[in-house]
């Protein structure tokens, strides 16, 4: 049902009003200049014309987009209705501006007064064409943003599924060993694992840094089940002070997992996480003091 509704933001409306006002003033001043009339009067008439045209266009487009378009399933009728309303906004916008200007005793070129009905028709058609261009622009931008959002979500979901499966298998193997060696410790590990996954798999794909760091701490605790507490996590920078900044879920945890996987050598392994904010950028670094990777090639 909402297939044909158009999402127009405040910035889009501002651009529409600004563009419409500038074009209307330019056209009005050209008419007054060619007709040899006072340009100050032309500016006043142009402002009135642009206001009337903008208000009618905004009202009709808002009504159309909020109440009429969501009920239309056929694309054919959608285009017809939008064309009619855009044309009416231009047609009656011109007549309304002409009426106001006349009542305010503003100078109006004689040719405009003589051909006002023809001019109103032309303004209606022009308003429809401009509205069509604006629609194509906003619709294209909206679809692009929606597509980018879906791509990011799919990547995060794929990353989440891959990480959860790999991590779960390792932890369950460790817990299986603990059930024979230390049942009480195994029970505590199961409770911690349950809390970890309940927190990690619930909510949005974008989370605050402090929440991601809590997940990382729980992750390292669970990894230490099979590494005998030889993994030490050191965090530099306060995640609480960076509240409001959101990052993809598991983005830091995946780096920590790789740091453990490629750096652990049955010795104490330090994992360093540094958080640094500069201007509008946030730098997150994950490093370790374990073994160096050999024969590593980017892209392979």
Image (cartoon, rainbow, N blue to C red):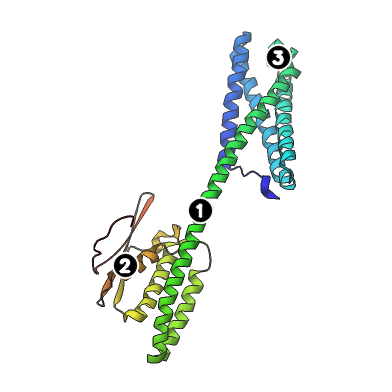
Name the image quarter holding residue 47: top right
Label disc, if present, on residue 151 of the rendered structure: 1
Q: What is the x, y in percent for residue 55?
A: 67, 33
**Residue 28 in view here:** yes
N-term-proximal mark, 3 vs 1: 3
What residue lies at 45% left-to-right and 66% top-to-bottom? 162
Mark 2: few/some/many CA within 10 Å (<14, 14-19, 20+): many
Name, please, the residue furthest toward the top. Answer: 36
Mark 3: few/some/many CA within 10 Å (<14, 14-19, 20+): some
In this rendering, would 257 be left or right of 48?
left
Whole-Å distance between the Cαs marked 1 and 2?
27 Å
Q: What is the x, y in percent for residue 177?
A: 39, 86
Mark 1: few/some/many CA within 10 Å (<14, 14-19, 20+): few
Q: What is the x, y in percent for residue 274?
A: 31, 62
Q: Is residue 122 above or below residue 227?
A: above
Label disc, if present, on residue 112 of the rendered structure: 3
Out of 286 and 281, give the one closest to the viewer.
286
Name the image quarter holding residue 114: top right
């Amino acid at each position: 049902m909402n297939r044909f509704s158009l999402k127009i933001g405040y910035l889009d409306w501002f651009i529409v009003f600004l563009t419409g006002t500038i074009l209307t003033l330019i056209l009005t001043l050209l008419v007054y200049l060619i007709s040899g009339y006072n340009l100050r009067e032309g500016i006043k008439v142009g402002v009135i014309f642009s206001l009337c045209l903008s208000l009618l266009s905004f009202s009709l487009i808002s009504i159309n987009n909020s109440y009429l378009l969501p009920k239309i399933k056929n694309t054919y009728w959608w285009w017809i209705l939008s064309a009619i309303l855009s044309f009416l906004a231009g047609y009656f916008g011109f007549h309304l501006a002409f009426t106001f200007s006349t009542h305010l005793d503003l100078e109006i070129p004689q040719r405009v007064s003589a051909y006002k009905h023809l001019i109103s028709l032309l303004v209606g058609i022009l308003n429809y064409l401009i509205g069509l261009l604006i629609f194509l622009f906003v619709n294209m931008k909206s679809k692009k943003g929606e597509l980018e959002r879906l791509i990011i979500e799919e990547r995060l979901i794929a990353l989440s599924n891959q990480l959860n499966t790999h991590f779960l298998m390792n932890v369950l193997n460790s817990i299986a060993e603990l059930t024979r060696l230390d049942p009480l410790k195994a029970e505590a590990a199961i409770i911690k694992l349950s809390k970890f996954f309940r927190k990690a798999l619930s909510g949005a794909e974008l989370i605050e840094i402090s929440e991601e760091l809590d997940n990382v701490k729980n992750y390292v605790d669970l990894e230490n089940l099979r590494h005998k507490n030889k993994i030490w996590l050191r965090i530099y920078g306060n995640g609480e002070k960076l509240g409001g900044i959101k990052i993809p879920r598991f983005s830091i945890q995946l780096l920590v997992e790789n740091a453990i996987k490629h750096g652990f050598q049955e010795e104490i392994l330090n994992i360093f996480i540094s958080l640094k904010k500069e201007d509008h950028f946030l730098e997150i670094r994950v490093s370790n003091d374990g073994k160096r990777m050999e024969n590593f090639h980017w892209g392979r």
